Image (spheres, rainbow, N blue to C red):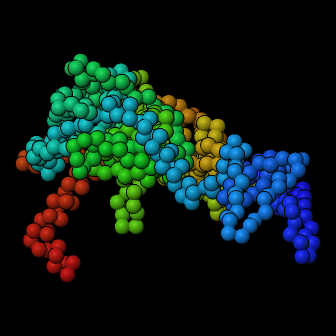
């Protein structure tokens, strides 16, 4: 409560002792401006007074003399609270980004620059190779005196060299494994000098949405190391362009340019949470980069350590459709409490071809129920495609699948296999096989072969002006 006391002034007489107007606060609040009992608010300062003491006598003001201002005891003066600045949120975000970068600095010595000489095969003349070309990318050191980078950074390699930060020496590296599907490659260096003063990076957990990430690498535009910061904007099953497969991936808003491939992405604790590997280039999109998350990286490393070589990610060789249409569910014979996805086609080279049938409804995979849109629970408040469950398995593992066939629930144990397609999406770095007989050259059909032949055909049509005339 506030009590205000005023001295009455009689007409025609000047008061001898004029008490100032005081505002006494008898209760204490949590506001920083109301600090204690007995606070007087003035224009320029806040003065403590004792409400029980008698009012101080102020001398009469005489003509020609200025009013004497009472001295203020600084020990009883409270500081005036300063309102928060308007750009406080931006300042806090800037401080957070600076702290994240500061924690990444000690780990930068583990980031290396990768130099590779490539010699691509000639699919039109399979006994020859194309002209060599060079490229540079990024990589980082992990435990076991090994280095990770992207698979497309060392594809069709002839020679691979690594250079540490602040060094002018290039060290010859050996390629231990190339995971084409997950776009990860593992390297090793025999020279002991390379490992002096280098500490391996530690892997962190899968980040959450809006977590800060820092991408470190050697992109184009300079020779020194580069650092870009951003946040995680999406976590879902992504299409890996190099491997022509779909695996778990992170979308970030940090810039990922040519040369950043293979570089680590750090969290605010300085742990590696992914590998930069591709970006989206579109007129309507800016600063959209993609990172290989730690579950995929650990799967690649454990696969190599378990089998002595990379065996690949297993797949469920089926094409399926959603069951969100209630009429379709009624036609299939699904109960109201049943959910799942319908099999449209089965890959004839997949192990599932002998067990599953078209129009079967997959209800669950390894005990996890599948929704009508093909998703499964992922984390709190998040769902993800059920192919994520398949990608967590290893080649040769078994999985329990529950299906609905002719209104009957069936359970099968399926042995998962790697990618086997009639027309392979890639040759896994191997040169094409060929056979020459009677002047004819026979070779295997693959997506790289078709891409090469179509490219050669387009170049020939453009050379002779046929394609230009057709377009005009």
Where residue 454 sits: x, y (%)? 21, 60
Residue 92 visible to the viewer: yes
Q: How many marks?
A: 0
Q: Which image quarter: residue 3?
A: bottom right
Residue 360 visible to the viewer: no
Residue 312, above or below 261:
above
Q: Residue at x 52, y 41 (%)?
A: 207
Where residue 2 sits: x, y (%)? 88, 58
Judging depth in this view, the residue of 148 and 127 nearest the camera is 148
Residue lying furthest bottom in this view?
Answer: 472
Judging depth in this view, the residue of 414 and 249 nearest the camera is 249
> Which quadrant is home to the C terminus?
bottom left
Tell me: 201 left or right of 388: left
> Which quadrant is home to the N terminus?
bottom right
Judging depth in this view, the residue of 394 and 271 nearest the camera is 271
Q: Residue at x 90, y 61 (%)?
A: 5
Where residue 332 sits: x, y (%)? 65, 57
Tell me: 272 left or right of 463: right
Q: Residue at x 66, y 58 (%)?
A: 44
Residue lying furthest top in this view?
Answer: 192
Where residue 256 sits: x, y (%)? 35, 50
Residue 156, above or below 2:
above
Q: Residue at x 49, y 46 (%)?
A: 95
Tell me: 135 left or right of 311: left
Judging depth in this view, the residue of 37 and 47 nearest the camera is 47
């Amino acid at each position: 409560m506030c009590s205000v006391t005023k001295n009455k002034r009689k007409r025609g007489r000047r008061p001898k002792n004029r008490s100032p107007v005081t505002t006494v606060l008898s209760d204490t609040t949590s506001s920083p401006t109301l600090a204690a009992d007995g606070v007087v608010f003035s224009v320029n300062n806040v003065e403590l007074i004792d409400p029980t003491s008698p009012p101080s006598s102020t001398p009469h003001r005489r003509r020609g003399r200025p009013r004497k201002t009472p001295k203020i005891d600084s020990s009883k003066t409270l500081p005036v609270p300063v309102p928060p600045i308007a750009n406080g949120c931006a300042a806090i975000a800037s401080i957070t980004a600076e702290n994240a970068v500061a924690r990444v600095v000690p780990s930068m010595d583990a980031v290396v620059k990768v130099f590779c000489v490539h010699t691509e095969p000639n699919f039109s003349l399979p006994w020859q190779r194309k002209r060599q070309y060079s490229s540079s990318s990024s990589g980082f050191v992990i435990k076991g005196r090994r280095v990770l980078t992207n698979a497309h950074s060392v594809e069709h390699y002839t020679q691979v060299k690594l250079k540490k930060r602040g060094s002018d020496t290039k060290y010859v590296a050996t390629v231990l494994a190339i995971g084409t599907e997950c776009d990860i490659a593992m390297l090793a260096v025999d020279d002991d000098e390379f490992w002096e003063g280098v500490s391996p990076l530690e892997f962190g957990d899968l980040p959450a949405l809006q977590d800060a990430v820092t991408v470190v690498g050697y992109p184009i535009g300079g020779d020194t190391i580069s650092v870009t910061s951003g946040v995680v904007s999406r976590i879902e099953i992504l299409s890996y362009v190099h491997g022509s497969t779909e695996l778990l991936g992170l979308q970030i808003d940090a810039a990922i340019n040519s040369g950043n491939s293979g570089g680590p992405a750090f969290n605010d604790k300085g742990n590696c949470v992914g590998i930069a590997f591709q970006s989206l280039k579109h007129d309507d999109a800016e600063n959209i980069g993609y990172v290989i998350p730690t579950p995929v990286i650990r799967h690649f490393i454990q696969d190599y350590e378990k089998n002595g070589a990379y065996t690949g990610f297993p797949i469920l060789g089926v094409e399926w459709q959603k069951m969100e249409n209630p009429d379709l569910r009624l036609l299939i014979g699904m109960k109201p409490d049943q959910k799942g996805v319908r099999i449209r086609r089965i890959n004839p080279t997949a192990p599932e071809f002998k067990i599953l049938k078209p129009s079967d409804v997959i209800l669950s995979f390894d005990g996890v129920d599948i929704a009508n849109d093909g998703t499964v629970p992922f984390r709190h408040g998040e769902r993800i495609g059920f192919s994520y469950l398949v990608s967590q398995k290893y080649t040769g593992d078994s999985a329990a699948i529950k299906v609905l066939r002719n209104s009957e629930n069936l359970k099968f144990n399926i042995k998962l296999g790697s990618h086997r397609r009639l027309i392979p999406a890639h040759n896994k770095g191997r040169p094409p096989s060929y056979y020459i007989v009677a002047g004819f050259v026979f070779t295997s059909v693959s997506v790289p072969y078709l891409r090469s032949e179509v490219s050669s055909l387009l170049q020939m049509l453009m050379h002779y002006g046929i394609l230009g005339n057709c377009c005009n």
